[in-house]
Amino acid sequence: MAERPERRPRRVTTAQVRTVERITPHMIRVVLGGPGLEGLVIGEYTDHYIKLQFPAEGEGERPRTRTYTVRAWDAGEPALTVDLVHHGDVGLAGPWAASVRPGDEITFGGPGGGYAPDPAADWHLLAGDESALPAIAASLERLEPGARAHVFVEVAGPEEEQKLETAADAVVTWLHRGSSPVGERLVRAVTALDFPAGDVHAFVHGEAGFVKELRRLLLLERGVPRDRASISGYWRLDHDEDGWQAGKRDWNRQVELEQDGPA
């Protein structure tokens, strides 16, 4: 029996906070720097992510992690930018971002990633909530002049909109959630889209419930091939990341069974 390849441990990096900026009422931008970032391999994907590490309460316990997309990377500095949603004192990373100061240290694992918009696609579909906004923004910046894109971003209200830069021919639709359930207006808008002809490359991420609905729409109703869609739940209502990650694999398997049938 052939030996299994050795699994390399995920790199753990110690960084220093360089700047902290509240870019919308509920989004905080943290720029990390320091010599520990030297040699990070970032740039292949637009959904690169890192796992911020926070000390656990019990002595000797493994740190708790929270996953965030790399909003921007400057290898020359080096400097790594992360945007974090802040909902008051709830959670780990949001309160950390609200209280952290330049010079403070943070460790993180990664980077990981797997999606970048295919320049050969006839058009692109980018859809998500606040958690997917950093990856959507990075993807728009990657698109070349002449690329076509339909972009749908659901946020709490107009005050949470951000300026998105792109050279592409992109139609950006902001959806204001208000008191509606997360993802309801997003699903409605994507469903109503008159899909252009040709090969679409799709990116759909955010709360797991609406991601499940859009997965059905794209793969089953619209016939988008699986390998032309990056679809995943970044989080799930009424679950913290620890609980969501523990059950995410089973959730995904159940969704595939329900929508695709037995393999």
Image (cartoon, helix red, strand yellow):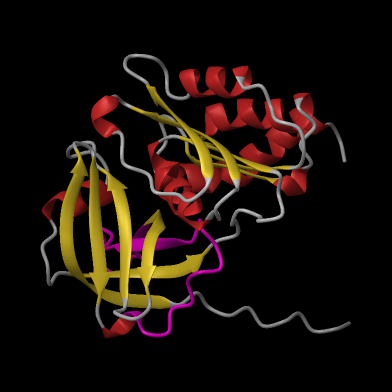
Res 182 quadrant in image: top left
Q: Residue at x 43, y 30 (%)?
A: 237
221 sits left or right of 148 in the view? right
Question: In percent of the image, x 74 and y 36: which residue is there?
Answer: 256
Q: Is residue 55 magenta?
A: yes
Q: Main secondary structure of the magenta part?
A: loop
Position of 233 relative to 92 (above/below): above
* Residue 54, x across and y down, in percent: 28, 61
The magenta span reads 37-65
Question: Closest to the observer: 121 or 93?
Answer: 121
Q: Position of residue 83 (x, y in %)?
A: 31, 51
Q: Is residue 10 above or below residue 251?
A: below
> Is residue 206 visible to the viewer in this orientation of the structure?
no
Give how far across and how far down residue 144 sits, in percent: 55, 55
Quadrant of the drawing holding the N terminus: bottom right
Q: For residue 189, which quarter of the picture?
A: top right
Task: Give left or right: position of 246 versus 256.
Answer: left
Q: Residue at x 60, y 48 (%)?
A: 147
